[in-house]
Amino acid sequence: MPVSDAQKKLGDPKIAEVLLSNPQETASRLQEDTYPLIPGTKYGLLLVFYTLLQQCAEEEAEIKNGNVDLSIHVSLLKKFKSAVRGMDYKTLMTGEDSVSVLRPALLATNVHLIAKLAAKIPCKMTQSGLLAGVVCKVVFRVFAEKLFMTGDGKQTEPQDKDGWIERLTACGEYLKQLGHRELHTFAETTLLSPNSLKLPLSTRIELLGRLLKLWRRALNGASSAEVTGSSEEGHNSIAMEMALEHLRSVHTAALKRPQECSEEQWSSFMNELEFSFSQTGKVYAVCSKMVASGLRLDVVGTVLDVTHKVQPHTMSVLSLVQEALSHALEELRHTDSEPQDVLCKIETVISSVRQHEQESGRLVSSGQVLAIIRPHCSDSSHTVDTRRALLHIIEKHLTLSEDDLNLLILYQTQAILLNQFAVEATLEHVSSAQGRTALFTTLLRQASTLDQLQVLECLLE
């Protein structure tokens, strides 16, 4: 039935008399049978429903969940009917996520009306058990977010910094309505969330700087009641200033993309770094990935430097390399499958250390890396093949002293001879050509099986 017909019938004195002859029965039927069938976007039908329910209440019918004055619903629906489209009024009344319900319906033509009515929307239960509405500043903030991120539907998305500045300027009328708390939320939503990645980083830095100035003006203009007894304002001020400084630091780091790193991988690193907001744990996570990928260590050092200026930490390239190798070596010890993937991880990190040393870098040295790996080269919990592979990686990539080289040769020899000969190789055997010759001669005399001969062949290699 059309809304106009329903309203006409309810206006008929005879029909109204019948419905109100038993107001309790009518009210129960309306709430139990009729209300579930009315779509939340049909404001006219909801207006008819609440008008009749209000009449039943006036006849002393008991209304379920009657803690809301029905006249409020009638008043709101009369205004929404002519100005709002697409908002689910029934969902709005649940109070579960009022902002998300309001957002699609907000337009430049109705935002002032909805903001004015917001406090009267009985959608949230307070701690005292009373129903409360939406703060009008929240309505303006939500619309400003929508206008900034998606525009007014008449213009294309900005393609450069000037275009986004114009978009923010277009939001000015609504941003002026916001208090310092809502401005802070607006900044977080539009410029400091993953949704903001469509804006160039340099653009976000410019816009956040403008918002910070606006935020300070709003805080200065706030009443004493709004700011007294709370540390939130100081926290928000520090947070916004740190966020701005952090974006600037990320911008500095982003300009240093090494040629061997693809744009896609670099963009992934920078996006993750951006949303770390220089928090130590998150910076550690992204820098660990950089080290594991074999990224140039001086670049990792730059990232650590710029984030340290925003929020001090104790991380260093050396500690990241050490932890990356330690984790990989432990994984190698406990892996039940083919260890080649883990060995590749280790070689990637060690190769980056070699490159760093060749470029005269001083952030980490071969000796510091060797100290971590050396114990695993003689660790019998690793297979012989695994130990030989580690030794090969070390010899291939690290700058070794003569003593280190002799020690590695000893480890290699011990790994090859394991359980095959009664002779125990020592440094004296491997530190000179004469000692190596003597050892090989002794082993050759003892060799009596095919396996032992194959071991000697391997030793010669």
Image: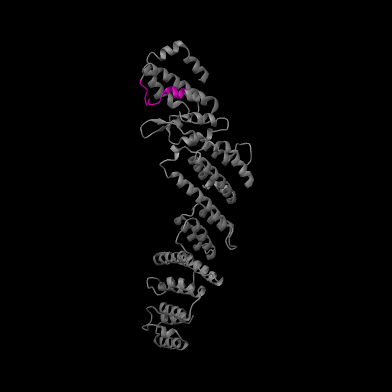
Q: Residue at x 46, y 30 (%)?
A: 119
Q: Is residue 301 above or below residue 105?
A: below
**Left or right: residue 204 compared with residue 233:** right
Q: Report x, y in % for residue 349.
A: 49, 67
Helix, strand or loop for the magenta stretch, by majority: loop
Q: Most extreme residue toward the top, as rendered?
A: 14
Q: Report x, y in % for residue 154.
A: 63, 36
**107 and 396: which is toward the camera:** 107
Q: Report x, y in % for residue 380.
A: 37, 73
Q: Is residue 26 above or below residue 221?
A: above
In reply to whether residue 362 is colored magenta, the answer given is no
Q: Is residue 107 above or below residue 14?
A: below
In reply to whether residue 68 is colored magenta, the answer given is yes
Q: Is residue 122 above or below residue 461?
A: above
Q: Quadrant of residue 319?
A: bottom left
Q: Quadrant of residue 331?
A: bottom left
Q: Is residue 407 visible?
A: yes
How is the model colour-coded? one colour
**209 and 357: which is toward the camera:** 209
Count of numbered labels shown in the rendering: 0
Q: Which residues are magenta?
A: 62-74
**344 and 114: which is toward the camera:** 114
Q: Report x, y in % for residue 67.
A: 38, 26
Q: Residue at x 41, y 81 (%)?
A: 452
Q: Is residue 85 visible?
A: no
